[in-house]
Amino acid sequence: MPSRRHHSIIAREGWTFIGITLGLAVLAHGALGWLVSMPLWALLAFLLFFFRDPERETPSSPNAVVAPADGRVVSIERTTDPYLKRDALRISIYMSLLNVHSNRSPVDGEVKQQWYSPGRFVHAALDKSSAENERNALWIRCADRIDVTCVQIAGFIARRILCSVSSGDQVRRGMRYGFIRFGSRMDVYLPPGTLARVCIGDKVAGGSTILAELVS
């Protein structure tokens, strides 16, 4: 049976923005009236929508690799993992402003290493964003010494990558570990022989859609 996780329906990364906007909206409404405060109420509605963090059911299959974020699959290709320097299957997910932006671990395992790279902010739907944009990568070692690399990539509008885990931490499939604000991309590098379970153009849900199946 799938496992269920419980957490707030609003991502903690958005609480400060929401609180400040709510306070300004209330003050403007009380002092200046509804028409003047309307833009602030509209901004508050957008922030509540953007920072939503719905609960997801995570598949329990031991070989399943789940989507690390909501979005659209924009690339599935055999390439080189630039972090582990090996052949790999890369699956890339593009997140628009309308998608949930919480990031979740695609597999169970231990974080062996983390790499942060400053960079540009080209459109995250483009393949060159994987090499040129600001990004944060995690090397996760699963059972049987299977290695997976998961990369958070900033986009044209995104200007902040947040990651709450580091080397030595244990992660669970579907566990929240980060957030990217305002449009971005996630790349997952998987071992050769991994079987993709999605196609380019598919819409995926972070923590619940099966991207691929590892071959032990």
Image: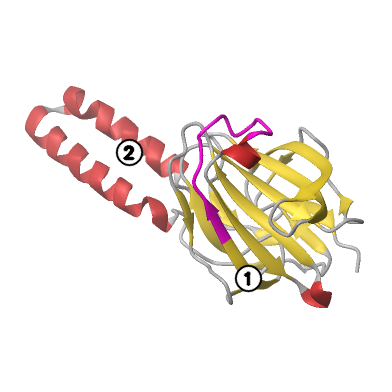
Q: Is residue 161 above or below residue 39?
A: below
From the image, state whether disc 1 or disc 2 is nearer to you: 1
Residue at the far front in the pictured view: 85
Magenta-span inclusion, residue 2 = no
Element type at marker 1? strand
Circle nearer the N terminus (1, 2): 2
- Label 2 belongs to which residue? 44
Q: Quadrant of residue 84?
A: bottom right
Residue at 57 percent of width and 44 percent of height = 153
Q: Is residue 96 above or below residue 15?
A: above
Q: Position of residue 65 (x, y in %)?
A: 77, 59
Magenta-span inclusion, residue 123 = yes
Q: Main secondary structure of the magenta part?
A: loop
Residue at the far left in the pictured view: 31
Element type at marker 2? helix
The residues tagged by marks 1 and 2 sit, at their Cα atoms, a distance apart of 36 Å
- Label 1 belongs to which residue? 111
- Give the camera-side residue of 123 and 43: 123
Residue at 57 percent of width and 72 percent of height = 167
Q: Is residue 186 above or below residue 172?
A: above
Residue at 26 percent of width and 32 percent of height = 40
Q: Position of residue 141 (x, y in %)?
A: 72, 71
Q: Quadrant of residue 122?
A: top right
Q: Position of residue 126 (x, y in %)?
A: 65, 30
Q: Quadrant of the N terminus?
A: bottom right
- Give the camera-side residue of 147 and 24: 147
- Count of residue discs: 2
Magenta segment, which residues?
115-128
Q: Quadrant of the C terminus?
A: bottom right
